[in-house]
Image: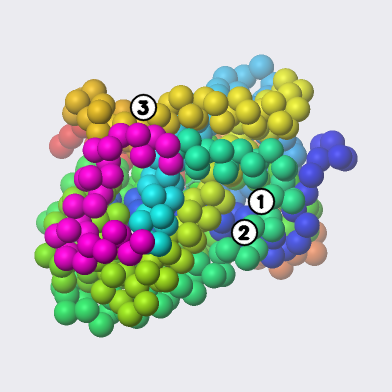
Amino acid sequence: MSESRAQFATRLGVIATTVGSAVGLGNVWRFPFEAGANGGGAFLLIDIFFVFVIGIPVICAEFIIGRHTGLNVRGAFRLLAPGKAWGGIGYLGILASILILSFYSVVAGWTLEYIFQSLTSFGGVDSVDGLHNQFDTFAASNWRPLMWTIIFLLFNYLIIARGVQKGIEKMSNIMMPLFFLILIVFCINSLRMPGAKEGLDFLFKPDFSKVTPKVALSAMGQAFFSLSLGLGCLITYSSYFSKQTPLVKTAGIMASLDTLVAIMAGVVIFPAVFTFGMEPAAGPKLVFEILPSIFMHMSGGMIWSTLFFLLLFLASLSSTISMSEITIAYMTDEFKFSRRKASITNTVTAIILGSLCALSFGALSDWTICGKTVFGLFDYVSSNILLPLGGMLISIFVGWVLNSKVVKSELSPKGSRVPMWVVKAIVFCLRFVAPTCIALVFLYGLGLFSF
Ligand code: TRP
């Protein structure tokens, strides 16, 4: 491991940046619309199952690889398994991270538009229907979503070009706690709405008749997406961890907080969905149609709305810098690019692909493959296929190929209080549970196999 490699400065910084990577649009935007389209309670339950049974062990697996090698995804696998096909995981991660960055920036761009609209109280529109229509008007303009996607990526550039500690860590330390607090306020507000009971029933009462292989696949994709898992994002971040960072504890805190934030977002959204008589299965625009109605019905709505979208924008930024770091670490480690040059390459690629995604809700809405727009396709392929596939390969690699002494000493280094049974349980999940679960969900969910 090179001596000069950057490291996160403090323990709090490690938590704030990993949680900052995990918490973002995945929780506030993607979770509610996926849960809404996949039956609510049952989806949440399966999601939680995947987070704890597959998620935490695979987070640990990424941490082990990253901290042990101190390298980017591609470099890490080349060092650990020279000349073997395992290196392919690195390329898979880099491809997926670019696809995700592209469509993610579009939604992050929507938050910028909504900060702007909040400042003018949505142009004075106050009827629920009028507020719901705002999104369609915005998407149909084409140039506005495009402009915001590019502006968002330029913000992202400004931070990634400055490097690990200065940019990423400082922002996350302040933003994450604030985001959490404001979500609590909105939960309380939604719980007082007339549709609260119906909303909570939808979210928390599983209706098992709705569980299909497709629902399980979507819940697995959601768990991976939300935990930033499966493409080496956490390998890259943990390459900046110090030897003192406790891996198991960090993984546990990260997974728990991330899931908590998704549930809180659900508690904010679903009571409002039923109060305003909307369709929970409205798809990607669901959250953007509902939030303005929630805020504009609160006293001081303009301020709450602006603050919320501002924080959501920052939360998205802490996630996109973690995606970008994958390609940047790769280019700087492997090709000796300067940080600036790597950041520019990353940004330009994302602007080109992101533009196609941005127009998917307007001019390019008829460009479909298998019934999905470019935006929908990037999301589906990366979240439901590439991430779980990457996660499966990473767990097999750490469970079966990597020297078990390395695994033990990373998870439970000398002097640490991590009991041996925890290490054993994690290794067991990595060897048997995670690969089998992922393979089964794949075979059934993609319709490759059925009873
Ligand atoms: N987890 C983030 C969110 O929920 C998105 C994200 C950041 C991500 N880095 C990632 C998803 C790496 C997959 C892989 O918003």
Look at mark 1 in the image and give the residue it sits on. Answer: 168
Mark 3 residue's CB less than 8 Å from ligand 1: no
The disc labelled 1 sits on which kind of residue?
Answer: Ile
Which element is circle 3 on?
helix
Judge whether residue 237 is colored magenta.
no
| CB within 8 Å, label 2 to label 1 | yes
At label 3, counting other C-alpha atoms closer than 10 Å, the crowd grade (few under 14, some 14-19, many 20 or more) is many
Judge whether residue 125 is colored magenta.
yes
Which element is circle 2 on?
helix
Of 307 and 391, which appears nearest the observer?
307
Q: Where residue 47 sits in the image (x, y, percent)?
A: 34, 55
Q: Where residue 281 sits in the image (x, y, percent)?
A: 18, 52
Of 397 and 200, which appears nearest the observer?
200
The disc labelled 3 sits on which kind of residue?
Answer: Leu
Residue drawn at (21%, 66%) of the image: 126
Which residues, given as a range, are shown in magenta?
Answer: 120-148
Look at mark 2 in the image and give the residue it sits on. Answer: 172
At label 2, counting other C-alpha atoms closer than 10 Å, the crowd grade (few under 14, some 14-19, many 20 or more) is many
Look at mark 3 in the image and give the residue it sits on. Answer: 356
Q: Is residue 39 visible?
A: no
Residue 16 location, quadrant: bottom right
Q: Where residue 183 sits in the image (x, y, percent)?
A: 42, 71
At label 1, counting other C-alpha atoms closer than 10 Å, the crowd grade (few under 14, some 14-19, many 20 or more) is many
Judge whether 416 appears above or below 408 on screen.
Answer: below
Q: Which circle's residue, 1 or 3, is located before the other in the chain?
A: 1
How far apart are the two marked residues, 2 and 3, measured between alpha carbons?
30 Å
How far apart are the two marked residues, 1 and 3, measured between alpha carbons?
28 Å
- What is the residue that sits farthest to the top in this orientation? 83
Q: Is residue 87 visible?
A: yes
